[in-house]
Structure formats: structure tokens, C-alpha cells
Amino acid sequence: MSSTAERKGPLTDVRVIELGQIIAGPYCGQLLADMGADVIKVEEPVHGDPLRAWGRGGSPVAWPVAARNKRLVTADLRTPEGQSLVKRLVAKSDMLLENFRPGTMERWGMSYDELSRDHEGLIMIRVSGYGQTGPYAGRAGYAAVGEAVGGMRHLCGEPDRPPSRTGLSIGDTLAATFACNAALAALHHRDRTGEGQVIDASIVESVLNVMESAIPEYTVDGYVRERSGAILPSISPSNLYPCKDGLYLIAANQDSVFKRLVDAMGQPALAADERFSSHAARGENMQAIDEIISAWTRERSVDEVDAIMQRAGVPAGRINRVPDILADEHFAAREAIVDTPTEEFPSLKMHGVFPRMSKTQGEVRWTGSWQLGAHNREVYGELLGLEDAELDKLRRDGTI
């Protein structure tokens, strides 16, 4: 276990108290911890965060990632004693992160007004399904729901089938990322003014904010985007193309790139063909150009097409699965995947700290501990001055 002095990254002087569970809040905490913040995650004493049991293939491996670089304590926030402990921790911290349903913190006597009364610089990060205000604020909200209400789910999948999902809880991680971004901006504001503030990040609006030009397209032209499968309407060529041994993605919709593509295919005349000579023309004749490219790729393996595209400088790439990523020399060179062996999982790997920073790069210092309250003595002793006897009593009483 690394001490505070050994933490690396730009946020080594920042302390965060993380409440909440599953992904939306904890992923924000993970991002801050990866950048060196002292993130103290508070779990309920009996079962802890439900994410501890999440995983695929019989192994619950979501937890080592979500709780990495965090110190773990327990406190029953439904009791006055547990609330008192957490309030005392917050008083010694820079940020409080929570992702409970709006109103929960207020019921526990932990509203921002109360917590900031003697702590003007406190930054409170609140992640929820619909936000802290508005007619939907009190609704329960998970990522799948936020993706649907925010408009993303309608656009995912094939046009002749019901809406699909991305295969990841993208709404949760988007909300967490936006929340982290705002937290860092709030920290900068506090450094200049001494003022803290509340960050209100909802899953629904996080999804809404990556919908690109969908809203102005409708308000100006009445155009409603629909599911388009593997393509983007009017963006061509940009699709998956069949090779002898698999699919390959080529994205050559820009005029100069399209010329490089057809030159590499040995069909330079296509660049001057009026059906394909401009971005707009290629968008109108998408099926025709896709058929021509598909006929060319079908005669070659993925390796052959990839080599030709890379030599020609055409944006293109393989459809990687996890085994492909682990074997890819680029990810290895970038240290994008790191070894994080544990007693339970001696071959455990996970994605590293990202983005890369030239001066203050963070690191995966440890993976999430499986022991509930692993750092109770360390944190409560260090920050609150509680003695072992006091901690033992709190444990017997069920407070921690």
C-alpha cells in the first residue's frame, strides 16, 4: 500500500470522500484517484458496494478496477453515528462525491448547505440519473435508462431492428467523466477565489451532450436521426468491409483521403467519377462506393488490406477483441494495459491511467481491496484521531 507521499499525479494534494456505488459515481472517483488524489471510499458495513460481486465468466473482476487507488472505509450512513463520522471526514477533505438518488443526502443531514457551513471551499460532486432539479429528479436512473431518455439508445443498432445498446454502461462513464471534468474546473475556481460549489451531473444530460448536431438538425431542417447500423448517413466511405478472413474498417470520407484510398486500390479514376468526386456526392452514392470497396477487400485478407491502407495513409483499422488488444504492440508500447496481479487473480491485467501526462503521470498503485473497511484504522486514526478501542466499539455497534 502506497502512502500519501508516494502517490503520483497532479492531484496528490487533493482529498476526496467518495459515497455511492456501482459505476456512475465510483468511476469519477477512480479518475480522480488515478490522477493522484487521496480518494477515501465509504461503503456500508455489511455488504459494501454491490460492484464487488460484478464480473463475467464466474470471476468478479469489476471491483479491482473500480476501487483501484482508493482507501476503503465503512460507515452506516443511515445512522447518526455513521453520518457524524463521514461529516468529520468531509470537513478534512476537498471534495465529496455521491451518486445517490436526489434527496438522500438531505435526509441524512448532509446537504451542501450543512456540509459547507464551516467549509466554504468544499466541492460537492453529485451524479444522478436526471439531475438534482426538474420534474424527473426523484426518479431512479441507471445508465440504460439515461441512454434511452437522452436519445442515444434510439440511434444504436440496425435500422430494421429495435434499438440496441453499446455493450457497455456508457451513460454511467460519460456522466462520471463530465463530473470529473467539472470537479477539476471547480478546483481551479476555488484556488482563485476560495469558493467551493456543487456539481450537478446527470446521466441523461451527459448522453445528450454527446448527441453532436442531432438537435440543431431537427430544429433547422426537421431532420430526425435514425438508426443506421455500421454507417453514418452521408459519411462515405466509412464502413466495415468484408475480407477473406474477417471484417475491416475503412474511414476515407474526406476528399484527399478518398483519393489515397482509390489510388491504393488501383482504381484512381474513381476520384474523378462524378458519383464520388465530392463529399456530398459520395454521401448520395454510399451503396455504390461500398460495393466497389467490398469487391476489392473480398479478394484480400485482413492483413493484406491493413498493410495497403497503412502504406497509403488511409484511416483504417482492425475490429479488435480483447485478445487482439492484449497482443497489440501499440497498446504495449503505450503502456495502455498494465499488469495488476492479486492473490485471487494472479494474471489480472487492466487498462492503465489515461490520458498520458508528460510531467505528472498517475499510476495504478494498487487494485481494490476485497476486505470491507480495509483502511478503517488507517483513515479514522490518521484523520479523526480515533483510537483502537473507539474503532472496536464502532464496529461492535455496527456503525463501521
Image: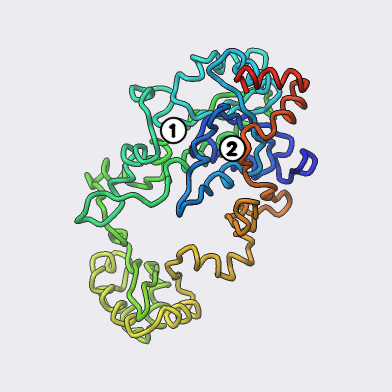
Could you say where residue 125 lies in the image, as x and y percent from the top left?
Answer: 55, 29
N-terminal-most mark, 2 or 1: 2
Q: Is residue 21 above or below residue 324?
A: above
Which residue is rendered at x = 73% and y = 51% of the image? 359
The foreground one among 358 and 9 is 9
Q: Is residue 20 above or below residue 368?
A: above
Graded by Cα atoms within 10 Å as few (under 14), some (14 to 19) or many (20 or more), the crowding at tag 1 reads many
In the picture, the quarter occupied by the C terminus is top right
Look at label 2 and name its amino acid. Answer: Gly
Find numbered disc 2 in the image and state the secondary structure of the residue it sits on. helix
Look at label 1 and name its amino acid. Answer: Ser
Which residue is rendered at x = 28% and y = 46% of the image? 154
Which residue is rendered at x = 66% and y = 49% of the image? 364
Q: Is residue 294 above or below residue 14?
A: below
* Numbered mark located on residue 29 in the image: 2
The foreground one among 348 and 24 is 348
Distance from disc 2 to disc 1, alpha carbons, whole Å, reads 16 Å
